């Protein structure tokens, strides 16, 4: 039930954010240049916040399901990284991004840190969990999927890393060096798929455990 609840929460949160791209004032936000967190500053920002919190809660339920089914150990890197992913998402809501109509803020700086923690923690979790089970005949297919998705998450993050690291050399601000909105949305999509894959794996393990297999 934990895994199923986590899958439903993650899917509903992701679907809600996807709908915000085409419904309400958030539909006028540029998908190419503006980040998803821009939605939190609009009149329907509360919808975005609830959706991200649903994603965070669902991800935490997936973590608990993986712990109970024995796929991750409590003190393992995979468990810690999944926890940081969930906490990072909660931090994105707790600390809204900079509202440039007003100016920079401490909240905006913390928002960036929370986003970075979330974006990097999930691929680390997928890679760690996948690596643990890649030689187990029961879970090899699931482990391979986790490894591939973890690698795709890092690949999707690479344009952002390039923009930040190259800024001192090029003089181009990192948020202008790439189509930031498109890069972030691609990364978010891959990471949501990764959480869903981990949740499905946990549900499968729980069913086998319940059946005594």
Image (cartoon, helix red, strand yellow):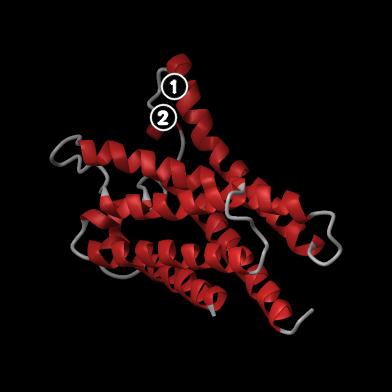
- Judge left or right: residue 5 versus residue 28: right
The disc placed on residue 174 is 2
- Residue placed furthest toward the top: 169
Residue 133 quadrant = bottom right
Residue at (53% x, 49% y) in the render: 80
The disc placed on residue 167 is 1
The disc placed on residue 98 is none
Whether residue 181 is visible here, answered yes or no, is yes
Q: Secondary structure at mark 1?
A: helix
Does label 1 or label 2 sit earlier along the sequence? 1
Whether residue 21 is visible here, answered yes or no, is no
Badge 1 local density, few (<14 within 10 Å), some, or many (20+)? some
Q: Secondary structure at mark 2?
A: helix
Total marks placed:
2
Residue at (30% x, 55% y) in the render: 93
Is 56 in front, or is 33? 56
Labels 1 and 2 touching (C-beta < 8 A) = yes
Residue at (33% x, 50% y) in the render: 91
- Judge left or right: residue 55 versus residue 127: left
Please identify the quadrant where the N terminus is shown: bottom right
Is 25 in front, or is 114? 114
Residue at (44% x, 71% y) in the render: 15
The percent coordinates of residue 79 (x first, y second) are: 57, 53
Please identify the quadrant where the C terminus is shown: bottom right
The percent coordinates of residue 151 (x first, y second) are: 67, 46
- Residue placed furthest toward the left: 102
- Judge left or right: residue 205 versus residue 74: right
The percent coordinates of residue 56 (x first, y second) are: 42, 61
């Amino acid at each position: 039930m934990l895994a199923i609840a986590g899958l439903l929460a993650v899917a509903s949160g992701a679907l809600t954010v996807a709908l915000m791209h085409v419904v309400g004032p958030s539909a006028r936000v540029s998908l190419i240049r503006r980040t998803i967190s821009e939605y939190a500053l609009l009149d329907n920002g509360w919808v975005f916040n609830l959706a991200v919190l649903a994603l965070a809660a669902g991800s935490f339920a997936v973590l608990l399901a993986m712990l109970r089914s024995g796929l991750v150990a409590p003190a393992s890197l995979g468990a810690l990284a999944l926890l940081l992913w969930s906490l990072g998402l909660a931090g994105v809501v707790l600390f809204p991004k900079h509202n440039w109509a007003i100016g920079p803020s401490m909240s905006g700086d913390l928002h960036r840190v929370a986003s970075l923690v979330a974006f990097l923690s999930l691929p680390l979790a997928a890679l760690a969990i996948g690596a643990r089970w890649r030689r187990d005949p029961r879970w090899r297919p699931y482990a391979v999927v986790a490894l591939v998705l973890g690698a795709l998450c890092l690949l999707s993050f690479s344009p952002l890393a390039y923009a930040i690291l190259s800024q001192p050399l090029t003089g181009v601000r990192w948020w202008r060096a790439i189509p930031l909105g498109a890069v972030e949305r691609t990364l978010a999509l891959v990471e949501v798929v990764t959480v869903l894959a981990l949740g499905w794996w946990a549900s499968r393990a729980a069913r086998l455990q319940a059946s005594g297999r």
